[in-house]
Image (cartoon, rainbow, N blue to C red):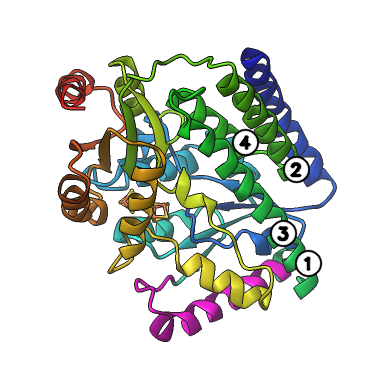
Amino acid sequence: MKQQLFKKLQQIAEQNLLDIEVHKKKGEHVVGFYCLYAPTELAVAANAIVLPLCGTRQAPIEAAEERLPRNLCPLIKSSYGFAVTDTCPFFRFSDMIVADTTCDGKKKMFELMSDIKPVHVLQLPQNQDFNISLEPWKNEIEKLRTVLETLTDKKITQEKISLAIALLNNERKTKKRLMDVTKAKPSPLTGMELVEILFKTGFFADKQKGIDLMNEIADLCLQLIEKKESPYTTETPRILLTGVPIGLGSDKVVKIIEQSGANVVAFENCSGYKQTFQVNEEKDPMLALSEQYLSIPCSVMSPNQGRIDLLKEMISEFSIDGVVDLTWQACHTYNIESYHIQKLVQESFGLPFLHLETDYSESDTEQLRVRIEAFLEMT
Ligand code: SF4
Ligand code: SF4
């Protein structure tokens, strides 16, 4: 049954490219984005398809390095590499890119990317104090609304934004429901299965299809929990992965952890649990969007107390035995923040902690394996 659902996921993923083509032939638009801070509701409200474009593969990095420095985050190089080699269909489909001034590498890369496609950059404040940052951020979101109205030639009304918020809240709630099945001990899903589901459904042109499929998988998982069917035992070490985002192709650490006999049950990063926030549906929609997106606890914010709070909650709720903090090479914000995360994990929870800094290549796989195996012995 589980296999059938993964087959269905693959079939919808393949059909998805055709769905996007049909959408474009009807004169509708596609908007690509690179960061969780982009309020995609506005594009959905303009009937555009929204596609997450962060590069997760090693293949295009060599081409990117012809223009970008080698000692740059692989996510940035991969993203730019896909654009410059024209090897990502989702980038090709995108009529416009919504980017944000998050970290230095990303915002400077977008300057180069704008030679290839129209890029609209949101000036993201780096502080979450609403007294300081909410007004300028709300203005940025208003500007984006106008830019999208011009692109799509559609009026983005308050009503349409509210409908888009409700749809994406439902998607986020469903993602949380799915991710929460791994709270069961043992978990019915492997970490790699969860990565695959979240990654592939993220590209679905039809959000409702993704929501329905995630619910179907979550329902099946609940049945498996009841029947006590799991690839693991109650003794399997349960790992929380925090830090930088991952996806299919940049999942080597998850693979190694699971090949070494543990189960990654929780993903705190922005490809995981950070996506599960809810936008307030009772407030003015533009204000609600501004507040909620500004509150995302990524390391580009200073300070970033929200990540600590989220980790505290997740470590308890997912019955975690050890925490792995992943940093992509040259990502200064996550690298430095690791100090606070280590303190939290070791001093407040007394749990084993491992900080890994790596890139997308396979060159350090065996070194990582040795360190991960030694770490798992402490769990
Ligand atoms: S890690 Fe932070 S800056 Fe990078 S994509 Fe995620 S939310 Fe955006
Ligand atoms: S992982 Fe770090 S360096 Fe890379 S894009 Fe995200 S914040 Fe920037």
The secondary element bearing badge 3 is classed as helix
Residue 62 point in image, percent of width and height: 33, 33
**Direction from residue 223 to residue 323 in the image, left or right:** left
Q: Earlier in the sequence, mark 3 or mark 2?
A: 3
Residues at circles 4 and 1 in contact by the CB criterion of under 8 Å: no
Quarter of the image with the N terminus in it: top right
Residue 33 point in image, percent of width and height: 54, 53
Residues at circles 3 and 4 in contact by the CB criterion of under 8 Å: no
Residue 143 point in image, percent of width and height: 59, 76
Amino acid type, residue under disc 4 in the picture: Thr
Amino acid type, residue under disc 3 in the picture: Ala
| Disc 2 target residue | 208
353 shown above or below 32 = above
Q: At 32% across and 36% down in the image, what residue appears? A: 320
Q: CA distance from mark 3 to mark 4?
A: 18 Å
**Direction from residue 95 to residue 341 in the image, left or right:** left
Residues at circles 2 and 1 in contact by the CB criterion of under 8 Å: no
| Disc 3 target residue | 166
Q: CA distance from mark 3 to mark 2?
A: 12 Å
Q: CA distance from mark 2 to mark 1?
A: 16 Å
Q: Is mark 4 within 8 Å of ligand 1?
A: no
Q: CA distance from mark 4 to mark 2?
A: 10 Å
Task: Tell which of 66 and 73 is nearer to you.
Answer: 73
| Disc 4 target residue | 201
Residue range (magenta): 124-149
